[in-house]
Image (cartoon, rainbow, N blue to C red):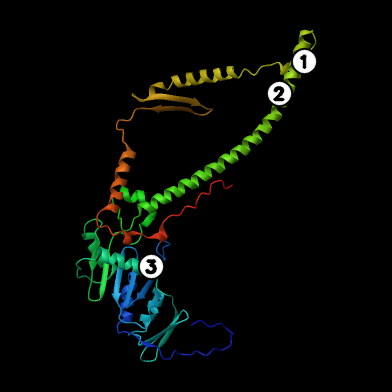
Amino acid sequence: MKVTPGAPAQEVVPPSGGSLLPDGLAEAVKTAAKFIGKYSKKLPHGQFVHIVDGKAYASNNRHIVEVEVGQTPFASLRLSRNDIALLTRIGGNPARASISGGHAEFTWADGQWIRIEVGDASEAFVERCRQRLEKYWDEPQGMPINPKSVDLVVKRAKKGQAVSIAVIGHRVIGMDDGFFYPHNATTAAVIQKRKFDPMRDDLFAEALAQTKRSKEQNDSKVERLKKRLRAIGDEIDELAVVGAELDEKWTAQHDAIEAYQNGGSLDEDQRALLTPQCSELVKDERRNALDAEFEQHEGSIPEGWEITGKRQDDDFIYVTIRRERVTKSQPEETAASKIKKALAQFFKPGFDRDFRVRWDQLGTLSPIVRGAP
């Protein structure tokens, strides 16, 4: 407990009463806690052990465990790794428990007790654990109940195969990825690696998300074009000013020519007005200098390569070369074939559509209102 220095003394009232707990509760949650995962935004409930209907559930994305707890006086309870460490540190099994107002009180037969903050178990997380247990459960293998043992069996199993390990009252499955793919793998990457699982991966949601992304890209392009229009308007205004200055220069040039024709003496400004820039002459000189520089290195180009461009600056000469590809692949056709195979799994006879659908994770696209500003 935390005590504030200098604060008035507070009476510590031990819990009284409470409902009886099943034997082995502490050991059961301790076993499940071995499979608690690190924090992940994709699996926030994986940091806890969830107790529902007399069973404890936990998953770290690679393993899913279900442990029989027995009939508990509470319908739903969520315990963190620290909660379980405190619960098991005293030793033995707590005899009674009372849960209310976000707090749980556990009492041992010898009078020791703890009071901790708790929450309700996640029904959605527990349901997903149950679904995947039922989907992938097979004949269990006799191994110790811990992540290393499960991983050992997974390593020996066929690629992508889920395996089961169990003792009485325990079920554990191990797989490549239980709830989500690590490293933010995209649907395209999953299809590419041929790890697509129609029970977990949703091509329909990806199609919706693709439409949403296209809509966002379209809106973004419209906004960019509007900005360009505003920039073009500003540039037109600036060019109008330049145009007025050129009109003045045009008039001044004609005045200078007329003064010259009449035998008058021209000042430096008038002579400058009548002196051409000869930009084409400058370009020709640059081109001749580039060709002369390039001739010294022309033999360095590999045979079979075509020169498509050359330029130079004050320090370097740049040459662009190309050659025809030897093998011409067709990535669009290859990708379309893989997507077609993945989509076909959704329409196989007997595919459990209700199990697959997760409406809370489908992408959304705001309706487009015609005529809206």
The residue under the point 27% across, 69% down is: 172
Give the image location of residue 254, x and y in percent.
74, 15
- In the image, residue 217 sits, relative to residue 271, either above or below, namely below
Label 1 sits on residue: 255
Q: Which of 203 and 85 is in front in this view?
A: 203
Q: Nearer the viewer, residue 148 or 189?
A: 189
Label 2 sits on residue: 246
Label 2 crowd bin: few (<14), some (14–19), many (20+), radius 10 Å: few
Label 3 sits on residue: 124
Q: Look at the image and tell me whether residue 193 can be seen.
A: no
Give the image location of residue 314, x and y in percent.
54, 27
- Per the model, the C-alpha gap separating discs 1 and 2 is 14 Å
Label 3 crowd bin: few (<14), some (14–19), many (20+), radius 10 Å: few
Q: Is residue 87 left or right of residue 215?
A: left
Q: Look at the image and tell me whether residue 75 can be seen.
A: yes
Give the image location of residue 239, x and y in percent.
67, 30
Check disc 2 and give the amino acid type: Leu
Q: Which of 357 and 180 is in front in this view?
A: 357
Q: What element carries label 3?
A: helix
**Residue projecting furthest to the front:** 370
